[in-house]
Amino acid sequence: MRPLWLLAAFLVWTASCSGGRASGARSSDPTSTPGEFAEADRFVPSYPKSDLSRALERERGAEATAERVVAELEAKDRDAAGDDQLRVAAADLGVRRRFIESLEACEASGLECPPRLDDPPWSFDPDPARSAAPPVSSELRFDLESWRKLVGELHGRACACRTLACVDSVGVAIDQLETRPMPEVQGDEAASLSITRARQCLFRLRGKEHRHRAPRSEEP
């Protein structure tokens, strides 16, 4: 059983990270479904709703462009290379649509909000034969402070993916980095929650979770 002072310190830390709301605390609700976040686990973003609305407008424009690309590829006589190009374009379109769905859910109900709205550059070859480190900006020291910063960055990058290659390679990066913190750091609850949230985003962006898309507002 954890000392009371340690539990109190953790709750204060999580409250400060969410603007006074303990969004990082783990829920003890026995009715919650495994793989789903209870209210206490919900991520509360720091960006205003106006930024979210602008991001939705940009993403819908990018979705329309991607739809035209897929339609053009489908209409062509394709060889094997063309079939592969279509497969990648269609898969990426699916990921972008699910990213848009997360923005719509965030706007409508405050659920599934990504930590960031930009599209951060990410290029990582997960081939185990190539021992390149994932291209993160956080320091790879793996003490408590650096580990919390790193998993916070991974959470942001995971939820911001718009392509299947990003989804797959961020998942590999998380798997590679998760084993490296010092033993006394690996059980940190705040860091573990960030990893869980990152994997939840990757799972959702792959289309492994069904949910209703929020209706778009009527044009005037």
Image: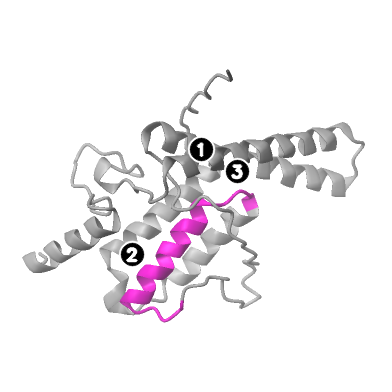
Residue neighbourhood size for the residue with mark 1, other residues' Cα within 10 Å, grouped as few (<14), some (14–19), many (≥20): some
Q: Can residue 3 be seen in this view?
A: no
**From mark 3 to mark 2, how far is it between C-alphas?**
26 Å
Q: Which residue is drawn at 77% across and 34% down?
A: 68
Q: Are marks 3 and 1 in contact (CB under 8 Å)?
A: no
Q: Residue at x 50, y 23 (%)?
A: 215
Which quadrant does the C terminus fall into? top right
Of label 3 and label 2, which has the lower sequence position? 3
Q: Residue at x 13, y 68 (%)?
A: 6
Residue 142 sits inside the magenta stretch: yes
Residue receiving disc 2: 191
Which quadrant does the N terminus fall into? bottom left
**From mark 1 to mark 2, how far is it between C-alphas?**
29 Å
Where does the magenta region start and end? 139-164
- Whether residue 129 sits left or right of residue 31 in the image: it is right
Of label 1 and label 2, which has the lower sequence position? 1
What is the magenta segment's predominant secondary structure? helix
Residue 158 sits inside the magenta stretch: yes
Residue neighbourhood size for the residue with mark 2, other residues' Cα within 10 Å, grouped as few (<14), some (14–19), many (≥20): many
Q: What residue type is labelled 3?
A: Val
Of label 3 and label 1, which has the lower sequence position? 1
Q: Which amino acid does label 2 sit on?
A: Ala
Q: Which of marks 1 and 2 is in front?
A: 1
178 relative to 159, above or below: below
Q: Which amino acid does label 1 sit on?
A: Ser
Residue receiving disc 3: 95
Quadrant in which residue 60 is drawn: top right
Residue 105 image position (x, y, % from top left): 44, 34
In the rendering, which numbered label is found on residue 53? 1
